């Protein structure tokens, strides 16, 4: 039992092609302790690293942790085991022999990736790239639009859409919304994670609603003033599907060859 490191990473990159990553991002290897020919027997999949996730990786004897959020966003001059910049996690995992690979915007933007999955859970169809362009396929030259827009099969009152989103994200009673509950909505867009910068695009495109997270006060005011129905589903709520999606895909690719564990740690800092 076991999968070669190189084979596993190539399979991950089918769902999260490096060409789809944003230029500012640090998708890919964060800690690489195994060569391509080394075997991975246990893989832990999580939205991000925390103390609890590191402890889980240690207890499982995992050789690799696959996360959505990168361990490092910017180049590090020093790995500080006592710092708050990821150094503490890095030092701990290196001592435990755990490598880390992160599929961040490479998965967000990829065809079939984060935002396609999020759109499907909301019920959007006829998907296109957002804020502009079609979804490229195959992906081999970059320039992937990160978010998605589409239409619901039938118009819904905004309140009914919010209830559907709440259930789909497991965020009961925790959505933040702007808009008339009775307004019928059909055309919308989704952007997992912090997509507030796309609110002007949603308004200019004439969308009825936009689902994202981490919306600022001023971004919320733009939406309210211009009549855009807005749902802030929380960063965790809009991206937590990562672990399930990646675990299921890798289990299908390597049946019986690899122990794949979705983290059991609560990674929502607000709940």
Image (cartoon, rainbow, N blue to C red):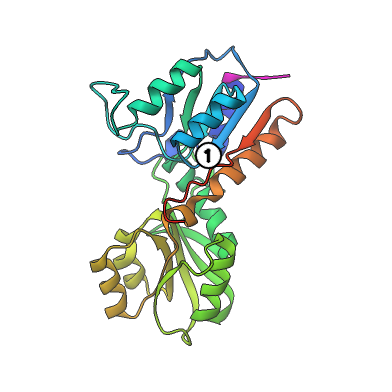
**Quarter of the image that includes the N terminus:** top right
Rendered location of residue 67, percent (x, y): 49, 36
Q: How many marks?
A: 1
Give yes or no for residue 79 being in the magenta stretch: no
Where disc 1 sits, the SS reads strand
Q: Is residue 15 above or below residue 150?
A: above
Instruction: Please provide the residue range marked out in magenta.
Output: 1-5
Q: Which residue is mark 1?
A: 46
Residue 105, quarter of the rendered image: top left
In front here: 110 or 209? 209
Q: Is residue 85 left or right of residue 125?
A: left
Rendered location of residue 183, percent (x, y): 46, 86
Q: Is residue 203 left or right of residue 19?
A: left
Rendered location of residue 43, percent (x, y): 60, 28
In front here: 23 or 182? 182
Dot 1 alpha-carbon crowd within 10 angstroms: few under 14, some 14 to 19, many 20 or more:
many
Report the residue that reaches farthest toward the bottom: 182
């Amino acid at each position: 039992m076991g999968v070669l490191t190189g084979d596993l990473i190539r399979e991950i990159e089918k769902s999260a092609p490096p060409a789809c990553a944003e230029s500012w991002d640090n998708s890919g290897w964060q800690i690489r302790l195994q060569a391509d020919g080394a075997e991975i027997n246990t893989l832990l999949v999580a939205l991000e690293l925390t103390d609890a996730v590191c402890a889980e990786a240690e207890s499982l004897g995992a050789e690799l942790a696959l996360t959505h959020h990168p361990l490092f966003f910017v180049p590090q001059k020093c790995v500080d085991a006592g710092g708050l910049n990821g150094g503490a996690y890095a030092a701990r995992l290196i001592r435990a022999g755990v490598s880390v690979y992160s599929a961040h915007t490479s998965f967000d933007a990829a065809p079939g990736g984060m935002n396609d999955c999020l759109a499907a859970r909301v019920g959007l169809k006829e998907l296109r790239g957002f804020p502009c362009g079609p979804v490229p396929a195959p992906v081999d030259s970059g320039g992937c639009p990160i978010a998605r827009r589409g239409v619901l099969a039938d118009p819904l009152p905004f309140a009914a859409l919010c209830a559907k989103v709440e259930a789909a994200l497991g965020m009961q009673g925790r959505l933040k919304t702007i808009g008339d509950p009775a307004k019928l909505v059909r055309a919308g867009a989704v952007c997992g994670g912090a997509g507030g910068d796309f609110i002007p695009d949603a308004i200019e495109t004439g969308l009825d609603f936009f689902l994202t997270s981490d919306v600022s006060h001023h971004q919320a005011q733009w939406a309210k003033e211009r009549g855009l129905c807005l749902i802030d589903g929380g960063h965790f709520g809009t991206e937590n599907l990562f672990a399930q999606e990646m675990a299921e895909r890798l289990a299908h690719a390597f049946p019986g060859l690899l122990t794949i564990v979705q983290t059991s740690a609560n990674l929502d800092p607000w709940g």
